[in-house]
Image (cartoon, coloured by chain):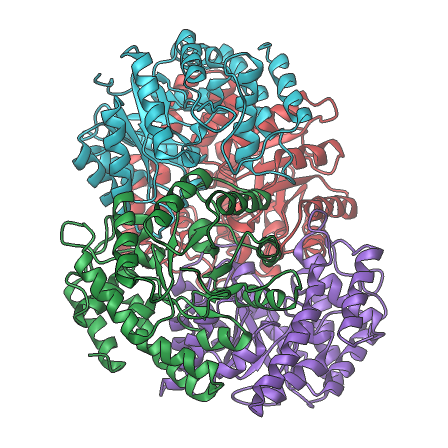
Chain colours: A cyan, B green, C red, D purple
Amino acid sequence: MTIPAPLNGVVPPVCTPLTPDSEVDTASLVALVDHLLEAGVDGLFVLGSTSEVAFLPDAHRRLVVETVTRHVAGQVPVLAGVIDTATLRVVRHAETALAAGADALVATAPFYTRTHPAEIAEHFRLIARRTGAPLFAYDLPVSVHSKLGAELVLELAAEGVLAGLKDSSGDEGGFRSVVLGARSRADVDGFSVLTGSELTVDSALAMGAAGVVPGLGNVDPAGYVRLHRLCVAGEWALARAEQERLCGLFGMVGVGDPARMGRSSSALGAFKAALYLRGVIACPLTAAPQLPLSASEVAAVGKYLAAAGLL
Amino acid sequence: MTIPAPLNGVVPPVCTPLTPDSEVDTASLVALVDHLLEAGVDGLFVLGSTSEVAFLPDAHRRLVVETVTRHVAGQVPVLAGVIDTATLRVVRHAETALAAGADALVATAPFYTRTHPAEIAEHFRLIARRTGAPLFAYDLPVSVHSKLGAELVLELAAEGVLAGLKDSSGDEGGFRSVVLGARSRADVDGFSVLTGSELTVDSALAMGAAGVVPGLGNVDPAGYVRLHRLCVAGEWALARAEQERLCGLFGMVGVGDPARMGRSSSALGAFKAALYLRGVIACPLTAAPQLPLSASEVAAVGKYLAAAGLL
Amino acid sequence: MTIPAPLNGVVPPVCTPLTPDSEVDTASLVALVDHLLEAGVDGLFVLGSTSEVAFLPDAHRRLVVETVTRHVAGQVPVLAGVIDTATLRVVRHAETALAAGADALVATAPFYTRTHPAEIAEHFRLIARRTGAPLFAYDLPVSVHSKLGAELVLELAAEGVLAGLKDSSGDEGGFRSVVLGARSRADVDGFSVLTGSELTVDSALAMGAAGVVPGLGNVDPAGYVRLHRLCVAGEWALARAEQERLCGLFGMVGVGDPARMGRSSSALGAFKAALYLRGVIACPLTAAPQLPLSASEVAAVGKYLAAAGLL
Amino acid sequence: MTIPAPLNGVVPPVCTPLTPDSEVDTASLVALVDHLLEAGVDGLFVLGSTSEVAFLPDAHRRLVVETVTRHVAGQVPVLAGVIDTATLRVVRHAETALAAGADALVATAPFYTRTHPAEIAEHFRLIARRTGAPLFAYDLPVSVHSKLGAELVLELAAEGVLAGLKDSSGDEGGFRSVVLGARSRADVDGFSVLTGSELTVDSALAMGAAGVVPGLGNVDPAGYVRLHRLCVAGEWALARAEQERLCGLFGMVGVGDPARMGRSSSALGAFKAALYLRGVIACPLTAAPQLPLSASEVAAVGKYLAAAGLL
């Protein structure tokens, strides 16, 4: 399908349920997609950081795209992450994802290597030219250790290289610069500025962002859909209350003991534990070398769900 | 072949020559391997950072291992980098590399994700267990943004998980801690501590390191072989003079204008330009999105070669 | 004077005008204070980063506090930065600032040293205990390379150590956690959460922040006062328009050529050039080793002022 | 006194003993200086990082310089750290230190602010011009978050701005570039390249460094003097054995529990505990907000001393 320009609304990054032996649990993945679609989301982003893309072998990645696109069958656009270290590797993922039915691609700056902004621009230009598909830049300095500058993003938007930005930089000032630039520049049109923040969706939408890509949207998609609708309706006080409820729920990402495990294990482990506790997926396992939450940490996730009215 | 324990000597990380359309130039790769073997190197490390591993698609990677192992035919051990973001992806590369004939594996800590030391240990344990092959840890914080602590490395050595360390951290104090620990701990035996530095080989060998993995060894393998032999012979004054000549030659990594390109483009571009100027490879191209050296930058590489007596 | 709890509204960090020989230009400083007070600001923050505190010797610092407190004479509270590397040095600055008439203190986490969160907490506790004055934590990871966690800030608020937070971390999610925690915790009362962002004031106030400490408020204090009043009145559409005008004006911080100078030279140079062009201060000099803007860079500042209707 | 050019040998950064109420313990400081002089050190560096300079108020700093220079009375040169955030503040410290009898100054790049290399160069030029004293650059990126490039250091050496470099960057490749450049450039003469590493003194001297500034030299000055003499005599095998003994002793810096305290508390706490256990100083207190070692951590320091034959 042709994706809307700009793409608006709630586009959750879809968790990748695994079987106990670390294969893709396609039945749970389909159940999760239904859980999201029934809540009224506007699109799906598979193979993002929340999807554990960096942990998944290529065959897992392809199976995820195929499973989701076949099940969604055009009801909403499906964006696929093509996360890898440099251009030629990303292009291979892009070809696979498009063959598997993805409607658009999401790529970060190169990582592992030390890259100049001119090389980052070249990277996105080459991906766009070789695939011809709508391409979203994924700004995630915590993972790739480069920040995409607003000028770079807007220039690539004007060139037609980028269809949108998924901003997970946490830099709301830079985010606003892109929103304002995309609106004011005559040579930029239909560009989607999406926030990856779970905590400042009302702010981002008030600034003029097109949409939101919240990892926590796996756990409570209806909450984010409600929040988005309230913002679109200009019901800012109600939106703020809904956002604050979701901020409380987001506390679950910190249940894992930082003396024992990393941030991925804790946050992605909590999302999957919540989906398991809510009955959406069959197994809360995260991919190696992430470590599992303890029983008491899983119980803490349950308390967050209960407090937010989700159990 | 079974690799020596410890692996000693000069083990250059082999550049990956590319054709003008970015395919692996296997004829040039074979010529480069001959250039290295004729100089008397003790092993080869394919698919390291100097090999542009992060830029190469899987098919390129496999072809590199196959080409080199077939040509080397057991004359020296061939170590293969299995560089990727997390465990399951690394294991896939490892299976491919071993099937293609690699004698040992070289893996970094996970990257892109935020990982706890306990997870890094689990990562190496799983790779070792699932492959059964000798495994070298590759300490490269500039790329993966985690430093491997000496205690962690020594513990994994004692467990039999790691066969060696390739240290490119630039932290000579930490490096020495591993060297001393590997010597003094009764539960560690035959562990190879290799430095990735081009500039402090004499120091590292004087400390007791087993060997050296110098990127610049592509350009002047005979120099590094000579340097290693002088160190082994305890000819420290002559070793220092040879090392200082190589330090001068290493200046070539800075020929690329930092206002225009990143460090990879400059350093790897210089190595490949030098190999091209010396007649070893057919084309100096580096992989996208790296940018090419200008004609005057290539000429500067030539001056470094001339000053070191290599043209 | 006793400062309000919480302190609300617009509290600009006051630039420090210098004479051509780098002394404090007290006449210009008084003129700048009048410029701010006439616009209706709710407090003044002297000796913050925008004040070039890190560049100013102790005698300059004392003179700034004395000059401003004497001139303000209790019309609004005056907060003084006590920025230094560790506790005993900060306490000395605090004693001087309080003797010179400051109403409250603003301190960062220790820097230069490598400090544990328990030591950061101890740092703030000791400052509060030894001075007895209201103490604001200044969260500025770009300068001090530690981030103040929301839990740490709220715990120190509950203990009565901290009267408020000036957040210049750029992390709006963490900021919101402090705002929500300060509101929901029964043991925290009258705690001022202030944003240091120039670009997301409407967002921060919508979240429930008490006030704003915008460096750009030197240049256009009336704009920030207007923006604050619109937010308090719930006029979000008008607030957003005013905020966007200020976002445009903020572009001036990038006039300095990054190939030639650092970010401080560019941003603080632009603020001082703007104050000079608006006739508020006599000399746009920034302190050594910052480099001056070129004539064309100053002209660019003038264009930003003109575009915002300030010339 | 006029300091030698270059300054050679062992120049320990002198710990600053404190009384139980955090004043300078001048009697212990004098005893520590005697302990160092009796071991045969070639100079003293007061007010470095190991001296807790970042924790000490100005009056403490002045008293340290006065106490040491008066007691040393010209037997060896006394270098004084003038550590502060930017130029004008550093110049004030320099004036005080020179008036108190220091023979040379040691300054870092600016910190807290974000500074361009051109501004760093300007910083050192202004300090040199305004004081006229021999100036050593202190390369300490872990504290100031800028690395001094070899080219910058050599250019300032050629200009006569810098008399030497104290390198605590841990980057032995960059260190060697300065050593080689200082030797090969005709416009650089008498430049002192000193390593701040405790663990690679033999390597640094073998490369051609002039001397060493080891924090652990407080605890075992005789060991470092012996090590230096062995290196000068070309007795590399004996030097290596002595260096390895000191590497073992250096393990004491890790006695403090990292879950409970920062690196300064642990390392500086260990040095002071060792000096206390050896009977050199009266009280092992470190300055706030550093936390004290526990009794078992102090006992661990004692074991390191015993193992090195120092108790």
Q: Is residue A236 left or right of residue A68?
A: right
- Give the x, y percent position of residue A115: 32, 51
Question: Which residue is outermost to the top?
Answer: A38
Q: Quick check: B104 above or below C220?
A: below
Above or below, D248 against C311 in this view is below
Quadrant containing the N terminus of chain D is bottom right
Residue D50, percent across and down? 67, 67
Is residue A131 something that shows in the picture?
yes
Front residue of B81/D303: it is B81
Q: Nearer the viewer, residue A171 or A4?
A: A4
- When asked about the image quadrant of residue C219, the answer is top left
Residue C245 appears in the rendering: no
Q: Using the image as rendered, state which of residue D191 and residue B44 is in the foreground.
A: B44
Specify the farthest residue to the bottom. Answer: D233
**Is residue A303 found left or right of A19 in the rendered image?**
right
Question: Which one is in front, A106 or C121?
Answer: A106
Query: What number of labels is visible?
Result: 0
Quadrant of the rendering where the C terminus of chain D is positioned:
bottom right
The residue under the point 77% across, 71% down is D307
> Residue C129 at what x, y percent from top left?
78, 45
Please report the residue visible at 60 percent of the width from the left and 38 percent of the height from the top. A261
**Seen in the image, is B132 located left or right of residue C150?**
left
Write down the quadrant of residue B286 in the picture. Answer: bottom left
